């Protein structure tokens, strides 16, 4: 995925205290554990990491929860984007009709049709590692949102 802005990508930004920098490697396991797949991850400069990942839209709540659970301080704009995605998803899909039969009775064809029917969300997550004083000043300067 190129670094240029694209309309079909959800751009998220988060701050992370420097002493919690181990949260970045933990994301490499937590994101796939939710059902997403990581396309790339890198340190774009000292103190900044970037993850590019994709996930089926119907697991957006799990993704949002995972990002917050590792200690990321999402920006208000990122919180708002994820909140709207989670609020709109049940209205876009009839989630009750999207149940796949148990794995032992599901055919490969049925599983493939199910997966292909999901809308895939592409995300570019930029993480800035900051010292505690900078984090506090950013948090108090910005209005916080809760999902």
Image (tube, rainbow, N blue to C red):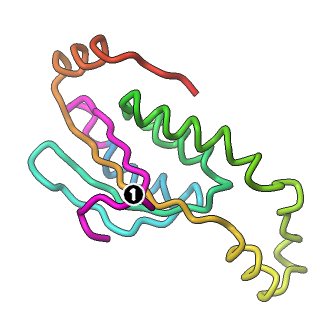
* Closest to the observer, 84 or 71: 84
Which segment did they paint magenta? 1-22
Please name whichever residue, 102 or 45, is drawn nearer the observer in this view of the structure. Answer: 45
Q: Which residue is drawn at 33% across and 56% down?
A: 51
Q: Quadrant of the C terminus?
A: top right
According to the picture, the residue beneath numbered tag 1 turns out to be: 28
Q: Is residue 27 located in the magenta-colored stretch of the structure?
A: no
Image quadrant holding the N terminus, namely: bottom left
Q: Which of 84 and 60 is in front in this view?
A: 84
Where, by quadrant of the figure, is residue 65 drawn? top right
**Percent position of residue 18, x then y:** 20, 32
Q: Is residue 72 above or below residue 1?
A: above
Residue 100 in which image quadrant: bottom right
Q: How many labels does the image show?
A: 1
Q: Quadrant of residue 97?
A: bottom right
Q: Is residue 113 shown left or right of residue 44? A: right
Magenta residue check for 8: yes
> What's the residue at 25%, 39% (across, down)?
21
Q: State the residue at coordinates (47%, 35%).
A: 68
- Left or right: 30 as drawn, with respect to 2: right
Q: Position of residue 91 (x, y in %)?
A: 76, 46
């Amino acid at each position: 995925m190129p670094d240029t802005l694209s309309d079909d990508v959800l751009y998220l930004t988060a701050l992370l205290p420097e002493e919690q920098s181990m949260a970045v490697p933990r994301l490499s396991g937590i994101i796939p554990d939710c059902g997403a797949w990581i396309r790339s991850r890198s340190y774009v400069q000292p103190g900044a990491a970037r993850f590019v990942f994709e996930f089926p839209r119907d697991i957006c709540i799990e993704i949002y929860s995972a990002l917050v659970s590792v200690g990321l301080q999402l920006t208000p704009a990122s919180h708002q984007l994820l909140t709207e995605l989670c609020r709109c998803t049940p209205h876009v899909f009839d989630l009750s009709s999207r149940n796949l039969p148990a794995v032992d009775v599901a055919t490969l064809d049925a599983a493939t049709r199910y997966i292909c029917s999901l809308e895939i969300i592409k995300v570019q997550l930029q993480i800035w590692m900051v010292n505690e004083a900078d984090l506090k000043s950013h948090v108090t300067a910005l209005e916080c949102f809760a999902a």
